[in-house]
Amino acid sequence: MGKIICVCNQKGGVGKTTTVISLAAYLASMGRKTLLIDIDPQGNATSGIGVDKGALAKSIYDVIIGAAELADVVVGTGVESLYLAPSNMALTGAEIELVGAERREYHLKDALQGVREAYEFILIDTPPSLGLLTINALTAADSILIPLQCEYYSLEGVSQLMNTVELIRSGLNPSLEIEGVLMTMADFRTNLANQVIDEVKGHFKDKVYKTVIPRTVRLSEAPGFGKPISVYDKHSIGARRYEDLAKEFLGIPLEVESVNAAIDTTAHCLDVPPVIDEKEGDFNAEEGIGQGA
């Protein structure tokens, strides 16, 4: 039976969609049949994986309102073993239509029962808000993966998110667990990134992934080309870190170099001015630090 992971943060701009696309793509490339469900009306995960939102005959909206089976809307992607249940702006209406529906919090969970056996992992990309769509995702999930930006204001949303998780546990999904907390968009040229990481580790302990995702140009560019970072530029630092995340997620031991990548980068950035790699658009971690945009 496939494991269902909701990638969620009520704060926008934390790298949530980049994380769900990148993790799903690497899990698939490692031989794990994976389904990515885009339940955000913006459909960024859909376009970011290369599917035309405007050309969809059916989408996750049809599933949520009960007009289609989930298996009927799933499409292939450019990555072997990675499949997508796409979204578009039609999903905006689902929030209103669900208000008076029976079992309104369980529509996605019910829909997943028919396809769960077909995948090893099912990842859900959620809107950056606590509405009925996000509640459906949290109710359907076995666990929640929380991307958290390495900035001060991200910390303010943590307690709100955890309150939401407790509410879901107490009323709708008692078995919901914290899969892990992923620190994203780290800029190690500042001390703030390390301070935020330390504070998050103090709260979530061993639930915080060792892998830290830097802020990089390549990660920002990839969605515009409709490709996950593993396809767009597999040699970039962002790609290497998301590959590390996939390994850590699967329990595959990381190489010493990967485990210490963030620490090494931090040490360099405190002492050496950043050096821009013209070709990569990234700061060279060996000479300077993390990311240029």
Image (spheres, grey):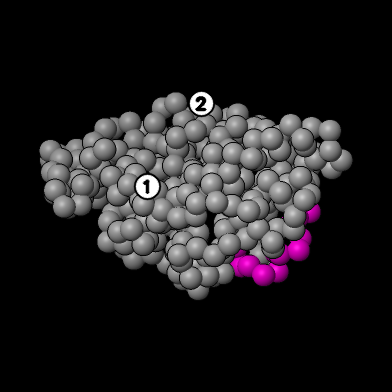
**Which residues, given as a range, are shown in magenta?**
110-121
Using the image, tell me which numbered label, if any, was put on residue 224.
1
In the picture provided, is 276 more to the left or to the right than 68? left
| 35 in relation to 9, above or below | below
Residue positioned 52% across, 70% down in the render:
81
- The furthest residue to the bottom: 31
Q: Residues within 10 Å of mark 1 (few under 14, many from 20)?
A: few
- Type of residue at label 1? Gly
In the picture provided, is 149 more to the left or to the right than 93? left
- Type of residue at label 2? Glu
Determine whether label 1 and label 2 are within 8 Å by CB.
no
Q: Quadrant of residue 214?
A: top left
Q: Earlier in the sequence, mark 1 or mark 2?
A: 2
Picture coordinates of residue 170, whole percent (x, y): 78, 39
Residue positioned 50% across, 73% down in the render:
31
Using the image, tell me which numbered label, if any, was put on residue 261.
none
Q: Quadrant of residue 199?
A: top left
Residue positioned 59% across, 39% down in the render:
89
Picture coordinates of residue 185, whole percent (x, y): 36, 40
Say whether residue 181 is visible: no
Using the image, tell me which numbered label, if any, was put on residue 156.
2
Question: Label 1, label 2: how many angstroms apart (C-alpha)?
Answer: 30 Å
* Quarter of the rendering occupied by the C terminus: top left
Say whether residue 77 is visible: yes
